[in-house]
Every structure is written in structure tokens, then in C-alpha cells.
Image (cartoon, grey):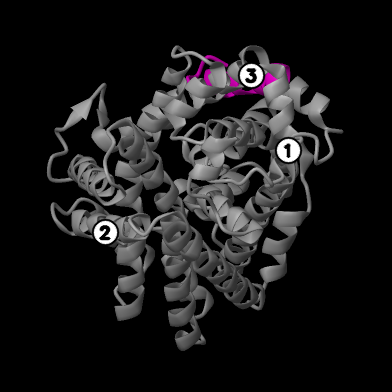
Amino acid sequence: MSKTTERANFGSKIGVVLATAGSAVGLGNVWRFPYMAGENGGAAFIIIYIVCVLILGIPCMVGEFIIGRHGAANTARAYERMAGGAAWKYVGYLGVLTGFLITGYYAVVSGWCLQYVFGAAVGSLAGDAEYVKDYFAAFSSHPVKPILTAVAFLVITHFVIVRGVRNGIERMSKLMMPLLFILLLVIVVASCMLPAAERGVAFLFKPDFSKVNSGVFLGALGQSFYSLSIAMGCICTYASYFSRHTNLFRSALQISLVDCLVAILAGLMIFPAAFSVGVAPDSGASLVFITLPNVFQQAFAGMPVVGYVVSMLFYLLLSVAALTSLISLHEVSTAFLQEEARLSRPKAAIIVTVACAVTGAFCSLSLGAWDGLRLFDKSLFDLFDFVTGQIFLPIGGMLTCIFLGWVAPRKVVRDEFTNWGTVSGAFFGVFIFCVRFVCPVSILLIFLHQLGVI
């Protein structure tokens, strides 16, 4: 166990939960989950999503916890140590590559959130639906502005990362996660006090199973996988900073609970306001940046000051959620470079920040000024999103389950799961069954569905 004790680790149990929950809670919860629920029948989707978190998300998360803590190293080296050989380290390399690519284009989306905080603050988002649509199109395709906001976000992330695990990541998580919940609750209360808000609440909590089909099940499976940051290298990297006393199964339950709670609160924040002004709940991915500014403006038309504050707080909330996730994504590549290239943390962080800034700049330019920068008929931004989300993540998740269920030494897995016999192993058999059979099959179904095979 000397490897674990020599390595930097989180200083408290609440630090473990908040930092790892911050990694999981991001735009996938506040942005993607509401529109997924809106497109798939509201409460029925939520119920299926929670079941998917239990049967897919938690076992996969515990699996990455086990690999990360046992390896006590960056993601690539952790797989190698767990297997006792070099071949499986390439699954770790895939996780590092996936995390790096996501960091590049995720910084661009995070920059959009930052711009909308400014836009809401100065009143630039006030206008009809067509105006807001044009505002987003003009900003996202601008050759300079979205690059500057993306770089600004990366610089903030950089300064957190260089301060280390306890003084940077853990301390920022203890600040950002409570702030995120406070912002959520304030906007939820304001949204639920609007006229006809009860229709949005009913949509969210009254299940309509007539809308459930195989696509809804697969969509919920995919959302549970992505919203918990599985196979991005984040969970495995953070677990390498866990102490040997961290209860992995209980931590996964707590983190998943926080993740689900944020997603449901995001629905309570958005749908009552949308229903109060007659906006369809299935507005799709444009919901946050095109539909909602107009929704807030209409919903609080009689209280312009409240509408101004709510709109600004909402985009501040998005920025906080984006920052907590971007920190964990950045750390994946930083830890890898620091250990594999034997660099100091500041030097490794600088290389990652600059590389991600360049990657993000190309992704942003491919949406506007350099729209000819396309591969396979996709902009570079969309290509990165497609390759990471629909190919790398499912493959990485499936290989991780196969590795842990069939390759890794059973005694090592059980020892990590039970903290060397000091915590209950009652669910160990269920966990192994899930990572051997349930999770790989589920991930395969997600993969085939995303590629349009089923």
C-alpha cells in the first residue's frame, strides 16, 4: 500500500464526494438532462434514468474507483498496475485521449456559458425568439470572441489545477458545489412561483409510460453513462487520490444521488418556466442557449428585475457546473503528463492548458470563420463530440467492465471493494455480476443505438 500513502490524496470524506460529484455534475445534468426528459415524456424518462444509474452507472463508477485507487497513478498506469502487465494500459490511454479531446470542445461550450453571463448582465439577451437565435449564431460563429471566452475558462481551470489536489481541486469543489446548489434552489423557487408552473411540475413528476419505447430506454442508459463521467478518465484519476479508508461503494451511491438530484432540480428550474409561457418541453439541445433566454424574459415580464436576476443566475449556474467538470477533465491529462513525462505539476498543466486552448480554438473556428474545416461531413467541433461521445466512451466503458470482471485478479477487486475486509462486501456479488454481464450488454446496446444499428 506504499504507493497509495505516498500519493497526494483528498483530505476529507466530504472532499471526496464533492470533488467527484463536481466531476460528474456538469452541463450534462443542467443542459442535456432536461431536454432529454422533455423529448422522452418527462417523469417516465426520469424513473428509467434512475434505474439505469443503479444498474449501469454505479457499478461502472465503483469499477473505475477500484482501478484508480489500486493503481494510485494516472489512468494509463493504473490499468497497467491492476493487470500486472502492459497490454491493458491502452484502455487507460484511451481514457486520457478521450478526456483531452472532450476538454478542448467542452471549453468552447463553457465559454458560451460565460458569454451568456455577461450578456444577461448587460441586457444583451433581451429580445424576441428570433433575436436570441441570431445572438447565439453570431457569437458562436465569431472568429475571436468564443475563443477568448474558452481560453478564459481554461485559464481559470489551470490556476485550480496547479494548486494541487487538496489546495486546488478539493478546495474549489467545496466552494463551487454548495454554490451550485444555492443557485439551483433560488432559480427553482422563482420558476415554481410563476403562473401555470404546476403544469411543468406535473410534467416532471407524473409519468406517462405510453411514451416509453426502446429508444427512451437506450437514451436513459446513455444519459446515465455520460452524466456520471464514466470512461473519460476523470473518475479513475480522482480515485487515485482516495485514501484506503474511503468506502468506494458508499461514495458511488452518494455521488450518484447528488448527480440525480441536480438533474431533477434542473428540470424543476426549466419546465415550470417553459410551461408558464407555453414553450414546448421538447425544444431539444437549443433549449439552453436559444429558447430559455426568451422564456425567462416572457415569464418574468411583469417583474423585469427578477427576470434579469434569474437569467444572470441561471447562466452563472451553467458556468459553475461547466467549471467543476472541466477541472476534472483537465486533471486527467495533467496527471498523465506529470507522471509519464516526469514533469512538475505546473509544467504539465501549462502544456495541457495550451494544447486544449489550441484544440478548442480549432473547434470554435470550425463553427464559423473556418466552416470549411470539416471531416466526414462534420465540423471539427461536431466530429470531436461524435467520436468521443458515441465511439470512445462506449468502447472505453465496455473494455473497463470486461477488464474488471474477467481479467483483474478477483481477490484484488474484492479487497478494494471491501477496504481489505473493513467494510461490508454484501453487494460484491451483485457488483461483479453487473460489471461482467449487465454493464457490457447495456453499453453495447447504447453503442449500436448511437450508430443507428438498432
Picture coordinates of residue 278 (x, y %)?
57, 63
Residue that appears at 35% across and 36% down: 339
**Left or right, 27 with reference to 261:** left
Q: Say whether disc 1 or disc 3 marks the residue closer to the N-terminus.
A: 1
State whether residue 408 appears in this view: yes
**Left or right, 433 with reference to 313:** right
Q: Which mark is residue 419?
A: 1
Picture coordinates of residue 267 (x, y %)?
62, 58
Q: Which mark is residue 155?
A: 2
Q: Magenta segment, which residues? A: 435-454
Query: Is residue 244 located in the magenta-colored stretch of the structure?
Result: no
Count of numbered labels shown in the rendering: 3
Element class at badge 3: helix
What crowding class fits label 1: few (fewer than 14 Cα within 10 Å), some (14-19), or many (20 or more)? some
Between the C-alphas of marks 2 and 1, the distance is 37 Å
Tell me, yes or no, whether the two marked residues, 2 and 1, touch with CB atoms within 8 Å.
Answer: no
What amino acid type should be assigned to the residue bearing mark 1? Asn
Tell me, yes or no, whether the two marked residues, 1 and 3, touch with CB atoms within 8 Å.
Answer: no
**Left or right, 149 with reference to 392:** left
What crowding class fits label 2: few (fewer than 14 Cα within 10 Å), some (14-19), or many (20 or more)? some
**Left or right, 84 with reference to 93:** right
Q: Which residue is mark 3?
A: 440
Asked where in the image residue 411 lies, by quadrant, the reply is: top right
Question: Mainly helix, strand or loop, the magenta region?
Answer: helix
What amino acid type should be assigned to the residue bearing mark 3? Pro
Element class at badge 1: loop
Residue that appears at 55% across and 34% down: 68
What amino acid type should be assigned to the residue bearing mark 2? Val
Query: Is residue 439 located in the magenta-colored stretch of the structure?
Result: yes
Whether 437 is drawn above or below 122: the answer is: above
Give the foreground label among 1 and 3: 1
